[in-house]
Image (cartoon, helix red, strand yellow):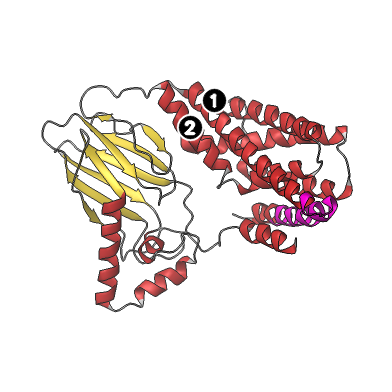
Amino acid sequence: MRRLALIIALAALPDPADAHTFRFTDVTLELRGDGTYTADVSCDLDALALGVAPTADSAALAAEIEALEPGAREELVAGLVRLLERRMRVRFDGEPDDFAVSLPERGQPPPAGSPPTALGLVARLSGQVPAGATEVTFFASRAFPPVRLTVKTAREPAGPVEVLEPGGESGPIALVGPQPVPGRLETLRRFLLLGVTHIVPRGLDHILFVLGLALLSPRLAPLLAQVTAFTVAHTLTLALSSYGVVRLSPRVVEPLIALSIVYVAVENVLSPRLRASRLVLVFAFGLLHGLGFAGVLGDLGLPEGRRLTALLGFNVGVELGQLAVIALAAAVVALWAKLGGERRALVRPVSLVIAAVGLYWTVQRIVAP
């Protein structure tokens, strides 16, 4: 049991403050009037080149690269270029283009307030638009976080925005004429997957909250009552916030979400059964979590003409992710009981760890700039 609690605590530790964090891989695809194109890809190039997680200490990674002999450093860069060439595709009419890769920020001072970097945070893919091409698509492998793709053309300098799930390819981008509106089924599928991945594996705070709900009672009815209250509440604020009816700063929402985790976990320790007051508070906490989901959905960007479909898909994906967490928690509790373990001996230590993580997050989110 101590081992399980330790795993939860270690997994919940936040990213180091001196590491580059990318919730999305931002890609700006610019189609120029002279028949050329560039795709600027924002990601942690130091970590990607060294084959380590982007949560690693950025200063240490930059120092490691700078300490290499010039020949070894160039070999590392060449390996990074090959990796980008393998894991990204720019396709014109379905045919991949042989783009060139450059690192325009290499050797430049990092942006103000950003951790150090040796290779920069932008890789530029450059190439020529084939004569007669009518459409282009962009693809990045699952090695990258979800792609937030912005397209710029001579006729649309601001450009449309599309979000791709990990390993997904964009819809066709017309090189001439108006841009097509994405289909409803494709929009639904894409945002459903994004909703699932926002919970599992990326939404650790929401995972711990739902896990706290699942731990209180072994009976199905109390669990369904809590999950229903939470789902109705977060669906309401997610919809209202997405349409601009409700707004609340993340500086307020995120610490309160962390506090909701603390409350649910502490009550699991102190109360042996579900009380009516808990359902009311779970509903209130659901309103907060909905605002948190809305912040993510705002970062994703709802496609024009498909806002309601995208909202529905994302919300269904969130629910599926939550159900997966509940099912896993129920399976663990059932296995524990089958092995002869006493339920409170499982619930208490796990809930205390969840409460400690939530409290840590609360303080961190209050004091973080």
* Sequence-earlier tag: 2 or 1: 2
Q: Residues within 10 Å of mark 2 (few under 14, many from 20)?
A: many
* Amino acid under disc 2: Phe
Secondary structure of the residue carrying tag 2 is helix
Total number of numbered discs in the rendering: 2
Front residue of 271/112: it is 271
Secondary structure of the residue carrying tag 1 is helix
- Is residue 196 visible from the viewing direction of this image? yes
Quadrant occupied by the C terminus: bottom right
Label 2, label 1: how many angstroms apart (C-alpha)? 8 Å
**Location of mark 1 (residue):** 312
Q: Which residue shows up at 69% across the image and 27% down it?
A: 232
Q: To which quarter of the image does residue 328 belong?
A: top right
Q: Position of residue 218 (x, y in %)?
A: 80, 41
Quadrant occupied by the N terminus: bottom right
Q: Which residue shows up at 55% across the image and 41% down it?
A: 198
* Amino acid under disc 1: Leu
State left or right for residue 330 relative to residue 97.
right
Q: Is residue 274 magenta?
A: no
Q: Which residue shows up at 24% across the image and 76% down it?
A: 71
Q: To which quarter of the image does residue 36 belong?
A: top left
Front residue of 109/126: it is 126
Vertical position of residue 217 compared to residue 84: above or below: above
Front residue of 89/156: it is 89
Q: Position of residue 222 (x, y in %)?
A: 81, 34
Q: Which residues are magenta?
A: 338-360
- Is residue 103 visible from the viewing direction of this image? no
- Disc assigned to residue 191: 2
State left or right for residue 74 relative to residue 308.
left
Q: Which residue shows up at 60% across the image and 57% down it?
A: 14
Q: Are marks 2 and 1 in contact (CB under 8 Å)?
A: yes
